[in-house]
Image (cartoon, rainbow, N blue to C red):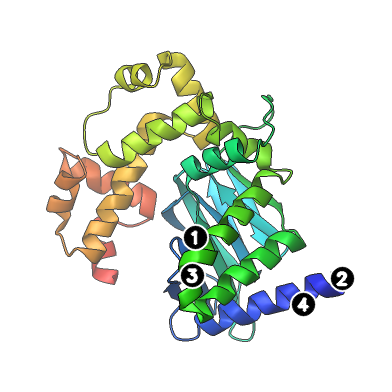
Amino acid sequence: MVTKERNAHTRLIQLVDQYTSVENRFETPIAGLILSRWDTPTQASSNMLDASLCLIAQGKKQVILGEEIYTYDAEHFLFTAIDLPVISQIIDASPEKPYLGILLKLDPYALAQLMLEAHVPFKHRTEDKKGLAVGELTHELTNAFVRLLELIQTPEDIQILSPLIIKEILYRLLMSPQGDRLKRIAATGTNGHRIVKAIEWLKHNFSKPLSIDDLANSMGMSSSSFHQHFRDITSMSPLQYQKRMRLSEARRLLITEDLDVSSASIQVGYESLSQFSREYKRFFGMPPSEDLRKN
């Protein structure tokens, strides 16, 4: 790293370390900005990753989507333009050099609006269409995150300045080598954008029976085209996606809402408790009753 890049990175480490010194997850007063800290590597765990831009100030993390493995560190960022069920694991962390992570939630509609405002060029291409990718972290992006985190120290400035800095971050992401992948999903009228709308519908209706034909038709797509584009972006079928959303929500209900196993399974749309338990164990590595006891 050159001197100014090293200084920005050092400052980023200092800020995340400072804000996470008391708790390992800090939801900052800046909407959608979350910081995390781990002193040891973690076990691989299944979770829903929100549409977000993820940076690591220090350490290394691995994310698995379908059969693909994505590894990123302090020199790379990871982003997903849609909510995705992934398996994640922190693979480099120690008490001396803890893992220090930054997550900024993304709004696909804000990205689409920014593309219009800035006249960001968009080209249809045929390469990898997955909604998750790793890119090289630039000094400009690092510097923008440093300025965003420094706003936490002056709360009176957050309301006015944070939207401006976040807009800069989104612009730099769109203009990065990985930007075309994001544009295909954010741009209104593309098949990627239709899949974003379908996922938004699934997020609010995952407990209901799913008709692929009806959902595809409501998005203005044929069933075969919808299924193919959905798999291209998420690495899974719509039914697999719905199942993972159900299981992730069930786990949240069990652990944070104190629901019993039967009530949680019914609330997320399962009619068979035995089927729920089998699929839960397959996804999270243990039966729901055992998971509940451990947490």
Disc 2 and disc 1: Cα gap in Å? 34 Å
Q: Nearer the viewer, residue 145 or 119?
A: 119
Between disc 1 and disc 3, the foreground one is 3
| Callout in the foreground (3, 4) | 3
Q: Which residue is mark 2?
A: 2
At a point 21% along the width and 34% down the height, the residue shown is: 208
Q: Which residue type does callout 4 highlight?
A: Asn
The three-letter amino acid code for the residue at tag 1 is Ala
Horizontal arrangement in the rendering, residue 249 relative to residue 43 (left or right)? left
Identify residue type, mark 2.
Val
Mark before the other along the chain sequence, 1 or 3? 1
What amino acid is labelled 3 in the image?
Ile
Residue 7 is labelled as: 4
Residue reaching furthest right?
Answer: 2
Based on the displayed image, in which of its 4 quarters is residue 13 positioned? bottom right
Q: Which residue is mark 3?
A: 158
Q: Secondary structure at mark 4?
A: helix
Using the rendered image of the protein, determine whether residue 134 is visible from the camera's viewpoint. no
Instruction: From the image, tell me which residue sits under label 1.
Output: 44
CA neighbours of label 4 inside 10 A, class few (<14), some (14 to 19), many (20+): some
Which image quadrant is residue 15 in?
Answer: bottom right
On residue 268, which mark appears?
A: none
